[in-house]
Image (spheres, helix red, strand yellow):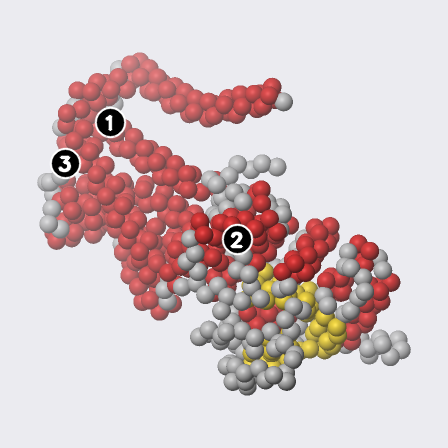
Amino acid sequence: MTAALDANLIRRHRETMLRVLIPISVVVCLILLWQVLVTASGVPQYILPGPSAVGVSLVKDWGTLAPALWVTTKITLSALALALLGGVGMAVFLVQSKWIETAFYPIAVILQVTPIVAVAPLILIYAPSTQVALLICAFLVAFFPILSNMVQGLKSVDHNLLNLFDLYGASRLQTLLYLKLPASLPYFMTGLKIGGGLSLIAAVVAEFAAGSAGAGSGLAFRLLEAQYRLNIPRLFAALILLSALGVVIFGITSFIAWLSLHRWHESSIRREN
Amino acid sequence: MTNLHYPETPPTETRKRPLVVMSGVSKSFSSGTLALSDMSLTVENGEFVSLLGPSGCGKSTALRIISGLGDVTSGEIDWPASRINSKGLPEGDISFVFQEPTLMPWQTVFGNVYLPLRLRRISKAAARDEIMACLDMVGLKDFADAYPRELSGGMKMRVSIARALVTKPKLLLMDEPFAALDEITRQKLNDDVLRLWRETGITVIFVTHSVYESAYLSNRIVVMRARPGGVHADFPLVTSLERGPLYRTSEEYRATCEKVSQSLLEAIGFPLANGLEMH
Ligand SMILES: Nc1ncnc2c1ncn2[C@@H]1O[C@H](COP(=O)(O)OP(=O)(O)O)[C@@H](O)[C@H]1O
Ligand SMILES: [Mg+2]
């Protein structure tokens, strides 16, 4: 009995290990290959630096890169937080009546389909500071997927459960808190994961726009600056930090989704027959 | 909608007031379907009434109208024995068990049964004893912390029944509750419902399309006809036998089933009762 249990545990542990080890070794192999190719072909560093040069630059320029990383992280996360608040709030407002939705949903769609790079210069003019402008841009991009997922979720509540709440004389607030919001949690989590990725992308794109206007101190600006100065190792270092930030955001949002859904939702449950 | 035509019980009146009276109820949907036409039905306290009829004859519609989920097009529903709230419904006296268990997947079994009390703003601590008692009644005491997805179809249905009982309603409406379950589970749940009915003295209106189920469970069967829906036949069912395995194999049960089948066939439009000619 215990032996079988142990064997099962070991098997599951081994699977988890493999899940972590395989992608890591693939990445390590690719980096090694990169180093070997760069060394063997003798490409100059200002065209393609090897991973070791990038590493050196990451350490050497940490004093410049770290504050920039912090700025980008701050903008991305605040934009995401605002988009969550705004998206959920707006969704709750929209589903209150068909007329409200008819009146306001098109505006949300217009905001979404207009390319953010095109709007950014305008926002830069009106916003009190570049930081605020970046925040607004990132917010606008992350807002819509959260809104549309939430609207979808709030509307796809089981009709029988709605009937049940009616039958017990539940108030609108009770129906929202105990039924509609929990029922749309899976949709919210989808919105969160998409919004998290998009807010970083929008923060970077907006900073490109702002950076060309001569202001800013986020990672995207450092990246552009490194390009002007032909400091390609530092450009790669900034790029790596950006993608690391993206991975961390993805990891955290996925973990939050798993944490809140794994007890009951099919998407987070191991299929067991 | 008021109790006006039921004056203060005169000393001469010894009969108890009926629980619910449907008089001349018609219901047509916006699609134009006339689901119910001039349906009248009086249900007494403590009865176990089966609504039996072909699919589409308006059984669910009738049940939903009684529960207050749908409006009538014409006619009236009256609750002579209850205090009426502003919506014309007896406050907290009705519970509904749907064909699907209709549980909230994000709540545990306990949380699902707690729902009706939570909506009445009763604290979890105050509700705990009542909830556990109801779970015990349906044999799910040990599953209070399980999530619905971990339960079988029959167990989910039991949770749904426990939730319906937790408010101690006077009237339990059940809309083909066991239609999706296998035969053995259904028989087991039928026995459970009968036991609950006997123990609690609750009034049950049970919608089914199964002749055998209705003949086994009820002490009154209302056969409905279709297009438009209404009452075709209404007969009491008295039996000397305790409902149980013995009753299931008795001659009395067989005769009842035959009588009910006959009536149902008439309702559908096969007058086999007068000879064997078919129209
Ligand atoms: N929401 C609705 N809108 C339009 N027609 C409906 C609706 N609900 C039921 N009906 C119609 O009313 C009739 C009775 O339906 P129902 O009460 O569900 O029958 P049963 O439960 O006996 O099978 C059917 O013809 C059905 O198509
Ligand atoms: Mg039905």
Rate crowding at label 3 as few (under 14), some (14 to 19) or many (20 or more) other CA atoms within 10 Å: many
Q: Quadrant of residue A112?
A: bottom left
Quarter in which the C terminus of chain A is drawn: top right
Q: CA distance from mark 1 to mark 3?
A: 17 Å
Q: Which residue is mark 2?
A: B130
Tell me the tag on residue A217. Answer: 3
Label 1 residue SS: helix
Work out whether residue A2 or residue B209 is closer to the camera in this orientation and state it.
Answer: A2
Q: Could you tell me the amino acid type at mark 1?
A: Phe
**Residue B36: image x %, image y %?**
62, 78
Q: Nearer the viewer, mark 1 or mark 2?
A: 2
Q: Could you tell me the amino acid type at mark 3?
A: Ser
Tell me the tag on residue A236. Answer: 1
**Residue A148: image x %, image y %?**
37, 54
**Residue A71: image x %, image y %?**
18, 36
Give the residue displayed 53% in from the left and 36% down from the top.
A270
**Image side of residue B26 versus residue B235, left or right:** left
Q: CA distance from mark 1 to mark 2?
A: 64 Å
